Amino acid sequence: MADTPLYVGIDLGTTNSAAAVFDGERVSVVRNAQGATVTPSVVRLDKQGRVTVGARARRFLEQDPTNTAAEFKRLMGTGKPIEFPAAATTRKPEELSAEVLKALRQDITDQLNVTIDRAVISVPALFELPQSAATSEAARLAGFGRVELLQEPIASALAAGWRADGDGAGTWLVFDLGGGTFDASLLETRDGLLRVVGHDGDNFLGGRDFDWAITEHLASQLPVVPRRNNPAHAGALRALRMAAEDAKIELSRGERAQVTLAQPLVIDGQDVEVDLELQRATVERLCAPLVDRAIEVCVRLMTAHGLGSGQLARLVMVGGPTVMPMVRARVAARLEATIALGHDPMTLVAQGAALYAATAGLDGRATSIAVPAGRQVWLQYPAVSADLTPHVVGKFIGADPPVKVKLVRTSGGAAPGSPGEDTWTSPDATVGPDGTWLSTVTLLPRRACTFQIEARGAGGEVVIVSPPSLTIVQGLTIGDPPLSRTLGVALANGHVQTYLERGAPLPARRTFTHHTIETVAKGSSDSVLRIPIVQGELSQAHLCRLVGTLDIGGDVVVDTVPTGSAVEVTIELDRGGRLAARALVPAIGQMFEHVAHLLVPDAAPEALDAALRDLRRQLMDARTDAFRHGLGQMIERLDRIESRLSEAERDIDAAHGGDADAAQRARRALLDVDGTMAEAELARKWPELDEQARHAAISASSTVGMYGTEAERVLLQDVLSAIEKARRDRDPAELERQMRLAQRLSNAAFNRTPEAWEWYFEDAASEVSKCRDLPRAQKLVTEGKAAIERSDNAELRRIVKALWQLLPENSEARRKGFDSGVR
Amino acid sequence: MKLADNPFFVLGVTTEASRIEVEREAQKLLGMLELGFADARTYATPLGPRERTAEMVRAAVAALRDPYRRLVAELWAHHAPAPKAEPPVPEPPAPARAGLRRALGWRP
């Protein structure tokens, strides 16, 4: 074991967690002390403050629910403390997740006799930044030195694809129905490379909805019916829900199950005996609408990528609820796809995470192996490679490096020294005077290949190098993890400056220059320049989610920052999706990097009530309008919104009953509905938008036709076809996007002409009376006129940009831009 | 996508490069940049040489993995004049904040 790498993957799930390890050739699932491959994500604190995790803690969920916590993953990033009255203490969700991680880490140590320091932990594809940050914090609390986060669907696909052995080429769908969320991912494997083609999901659909559907059915059979909005009924419902969950699992195999509770439930002071029969057909009937909702998401995703039923190469089922035969049969039938067999839906994510740890070169062992003496060499090579002939790059440390290097494959084929031994030697690579060299190696398919490094000095003498060898595993790889949601900065005009687009490879970093719209006075604690960081796919800031703010206060600046000062903002995400943001104000030479508010906002039931009322009113207006204009598609869409609102209402009810998790679900559902309503609003303005699109197409064609390059003309053709398609499909969001592209091409072409800046100048100069610093603006106008006289286009451009900065922002737009202080 | 940051120029591969060749080149460049190989630090573009960073290499390979984005990049690369690979102009003396700016990911 000592010199074999050990890559660790952990699936930190809402309901269950699992760990797996990969040694370069085989993936194995780690068993816990009870011998099980999954550990319930449940933590209990007794009155002595002792912590119990997993199946043992789960047993207390019914008997001692106030001191036993489950499903805390859904509260990650909210900072909401969870109370443990017996121990008179509270724990944050990340602290509870840390307990689960500690338990899994200990299981690995017990089973493999190694201490683990590094691992890959999977997170849902649609996790927001604060939730990812909380997951990293949980890992740190659990004693991990370094972790990387990986999106769950990628982990599943990597695990499923690893075993596919070449027959899995084509498009795959990963159907991941977890405890609380549903993720559908389309992936493509080609040449041993895995690519995420697209992703969709429903953050509010999971196994727990199945359990609640069954629970509510069982509750309705009782003489006294417990209600979710009554805190006094919470205990009875919890007991019933656990019984429902067990019955659901039992019905995966049998036709009927008996739901019997040892103790009677106490509901409104009455003892209620529970002894009910539940039939498989009933459970299937109750769960079918939920499964159909998941199927709808899949169809939507496939249609968006031009795929119809029957066109999937394979279907991978992940998550506990997919064990139900009805779920498998219904999904396979509707999508006309074959389910990939031989995968354990409960541990596939952990296995994929372990494989990914290898791709990322993240050896889990705490203490590195003692490096033997010899000439030090730094190496760069892929720990896992789909390519059969990857490069190895090296650099010798110190003066007078060896002159030649070759790499000899010593394992990966048959055993060394055996008759079938399959050794291979690279050609000599020449070492540069700075000690650098580059070589190419040949791998064997699906094997871990070890190469000895043989170096020779100027006189041909052998030079012992350290490390003496390297290992590369050949197999399916995925490149850098993609960013799941677009990230940007909200501007004072209510729009978003996109920094990193969804799908951007991580780690990523981008800098843009903004300008302040008001003065930050030195020493004044009231004057604060706010830079809001938002995540979301829409271009209007208020429809995105605020994930952090970078505040520059008057009390910290070394000098007053005048209006219009440049602020260079850099947003950086590491491979695990952790956010860092910095702002440099060159005028005062000061850098600010403290990002505040990295929390999922609180969800008070009263605020949710108000938001729900507001959305209902908007929905009613939109519906009246849709009927008036006979917009059939829109009516269907609004009906879907209506049903989402009804679900949210149920959750808000439960939130009033003290269920913080339901409150968060409701908050996110309302935000999503708000986004959909904004799109519906766009659709309502369709005739206007359609007209705008026609004008945009004509204007772009004439500008690009006159001033554009050949490539711009070809690209415009693409955009024009897309505009036509969006008009035919009556898709307002897509039409807006394509119009923006046409506008961008048109601008690029137009800006190339000398008249462009004169035109912009005239436009800005006509509004000079509105400018903040009038004397300066007037001076710029005079300078601009002189620049036009001299035909000094570069100067004119500078002047126009300076004028733009002096024009005011609309206060309503600024409010919608989270009070952003930059433009 | 256009000229200076066209993924094909960033990676120094032709538009005919296969997917695996693109990945191989990116992996090599990332290794070379990590170990400070001088010849990996710049790349040729029709607008003259540009500085190459690990972020740019990762972004370029991600762009070429996506068939549509690759098509757009191919289009620009096809219509571009031949890249100029003259040696980079020596950098002017660094202003006081240059280190800070570079730390922020600001390309000089």
Image (tube, rainbow, N blue to C red):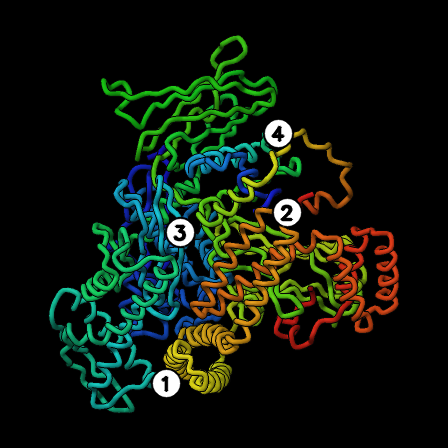
What separation in Å lies between label 4 and label 3 (alpha carbons)? 34 Å
Chain label for disc 2: B
Question: Going 27% across and 72% down the picture, which residue do you hit?
Answer: A210
Question: Going 48% across and 63% down the picture, which residue do you hit?
Answer: A724
Q: Amino acid at mark 4?
A: Ala
Residue corresponding to mark 3: A196
Q: Is residue A660 above or below residue A507?
A: below
Helix, strand or loop at disc 3? strand
User: In this rendering, which labeled residue sits more in front, label 4 or label 3?
Assistant: 3
Helix, strand or loop at disc 4? helix
Chain label for disc 4: B
Q: Residues within 10 Å of mark 3 (few under 14, many from 20)?
A: many
| Quarter of the image where one finds residue A288 | bottom left
What separation in Å lies between label 3 and label 2 (alpha carbons)? 27 Å
Q: Residue furthest left?
A: A255
What separation in Å lies between label 2 and label 1 (alpha carbons)? 51 Å
Q: Amino acid at mark 3?
A: Val
Q: Amino acid at mark 1?
A: Asn
| Quarter of the image where one finds residue A253 | bottom left
Residue corresponding to mark 4: B38
Residue corresponding to mark 2: B105
Visible residue check, residue A65:
yes
Q: Residues within 10 Å of mark 1 (few under 14, many from 20)?
A: some
Residue corresponding to mark 1: A229
Chain label for disc 3: A
Visible residue check, residue A658:
no
- In which quadrant will I find the C terminus of chain B? top right
Q: Do marks 2 and 1 share a chain?
A: no
Helix, strand or loop at disc 2? loop
Q: Do marks 4 and 3 share a chain?
A: no
N-terminal label among 3 and 1: 3
